Image (cartoon, grey):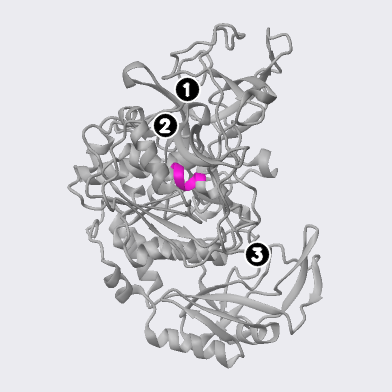
Amino acid sequence: MRSNRAKVRAGVSMAATLPMLAGALALGIPAAHAADNPNRDTLAGTKPAWATAKADKGATSDSSKVSARVYLAGKDATGLAAYAKAVADPSSASYGKYLNAQQAKQRFGATAAQVTAVKSWLTSAGLKVTDVTEHYVAVSGDVAAVEKAFGTQLHNYTKGSKTYHAPAKAASAPAALAGAVLTVTGLDNAPHKASSKDQLPPPDAVFKNAGPFSSYYGSNTASTLPAAYGSKIPYAIKGYTGKQLRAAYGAGAYTGKGVRVAITDAYASPTIAFDAATYAKKNGDAAYNSGQLKQVLPKNYTKTDECGAAGWYGEETLDVEAVHAVAPDANITYVGAASCYDDDLLDSLSKVVDNHLADIVSNSWGDIEANQTPDLAAAYDQVFQFGAVEGIGFYFSSGDNGDEVANTGTKQVDTPANSAWVTAVGGTSLAVGKGDKYLWETGWGTEKATLSADGKSWTGFPGPFTSGAGGGTSKTVAEPFYQKGVVPDALATANNAAGNRVVPDISAIADPNTGFLVGQTQTFPDGSQQYSEYRIGGTSLASPVIAAIQALAQQARGGKAIGFANPSIYAKYGSKAFHDVTDNPTGSGLAVARTDFVNAYDASDGLTVSVRSLGKDSSLSAVKGYDDVTGVGTPANGYVQSFGRH
């Protein structure tokens, strides 16, 4: 499953740490003849990394039940990847020659004959087909039937303190299917916890920021608090608005008119229409036109308890309000998943592609790379490639835990942001001054120290790392063509001499201490549900902000879709289209003061006062040129217009 990235409201990520299918990530699942059976094609990556001989507890009972999805490779998987690359590359003769959804399906999708053959193979093994789409065939059955179908045995393996079943060797498919199968998911059951609930819970408990605030960066100095880095520091802002962000990132007169933006998350806020309209009215954004905000939702919801369904309401709220604030005339379609599990999130992404619901898709969710499995990586990449050939670009937040060492003990990047087929969005701390003037940015990375008991110093200043923009070098995804010559070799080869994918690609505001103001209906202590506003951050903010800016850029090029943007973004590297973000841009150290409610909503239980140092992202650093905190930088004046010149 996946975790949402929003709720970074107190300087640390509030996103739940959610379990998902474990294993090492590898990009691409080639079909190769199994050495021990020339009549079958191996589906590489379908045995998870944790299913080791040491953890093996023996065969799984033949009567145990399994549900799986067999993803279809389509008629030309190699051609799909090649065309996805060519159509996104400004130097290619095929650049911008997008296919519509029907053309893409006809050229690269699975044929009726392939679907029939796959169904026949599965049913002949004793499995029951439960669903068929143009992307997969879903089946269920007992272990004996699964083992017969996929040419492997299922064994029980210990993983941490629990035991799960998984293939004892990689699954395979009959060679007679001629490569019609891309991969199969669901052969291991870590950690599918069922939930019988299918109704959404009420909104989460209220969260409010305590003052004092700054209305713009530096407008209110904390004169009675201790200094930091040799001078008095400002209070954190109340929360930037669309007007301030549009000015900072060079929106100009563009509004996103005529451009469609999709947002994917799990579940759906029951109050989003009211909240979005109320927020726009209160904060100077344009009112929504009829039909400007739409939702595409599943018939039923699942796993609402274990996924923390109500926690996703704030994610949708942030994404919708941020897109509208920066691109007030763009049409927004929210596509909610039935749960936070990969199968359901994949279904939501597929809806966008299959129905071409938008040209730009913001996704503020993900997990650590170690928690991705190769079978799912292949399924995700296939969706992203179909999107690319249709002129659809996917934007993913890069994560809120810096290099992930403090969170997991291991330096790693997040996924799906690590995919070579998406635009990974990193995060910054943003200073917008008086008159909406852009002052500076640093890479988002926070260290926190609290006020001493006597109020005369900051205890343990600057304090421990709390949160920061995700970034770094993938351990498994090869370096994509567009990063070569831009990403420093020291980063690209950090885990592999041949070079790997480095995250992020571009960045925008993310630091909750310089964050965005949102409005949401929340549950108050007396049980009432009321609209209230608070400041929020995380790369969950950066992703919809960049998606909105891309909507402005698409408008600037006469509405022509940008599609998969990375080749174009890297082609602009080093130009005035970007703010080249570095840590400590003023040379004197940067920090803000914050006062927070102990109970998160009022002063009845007291207040805490802290100093938040900026530009200290774990082991990651924002430096001159490309870096693994901010990528090529943030949009500057001229970025939007630069897409219009293609």
Q: In the drawing, what numbered circle is on residue 108?
A: none
Q: Is residue 102 above or below residue 392?
A: below
Tag 2: amino acid: Gly
Q: Which residue is mark 3?
A: 195
Task: Report, in whole angstroms, how far the alpha carbon at label 1 lies from the one at label 3.
Answer: 41 Å
Q: Which residue is mark 2?
A: 625
Element carrying mark 1: loop
Tag 1: amino acid: Ile
Q: Which residue is mark 1?
A: 237
Near mark 1 (Cα within 10 A), the count class, few <14, some 14-19 or many ≥20, is many
Instruction: Determine the main secondary structure of the stretch shown in magenta.
Output: helix
Image: magenta residue range: 314-318
Tag 3: amino acid: Ser
Q: Is residue 119 above or below residue 479?
A: below
Q: Is residue 298 above or below residue 445?
A: below
N-terminal label among 2 and 1: 1
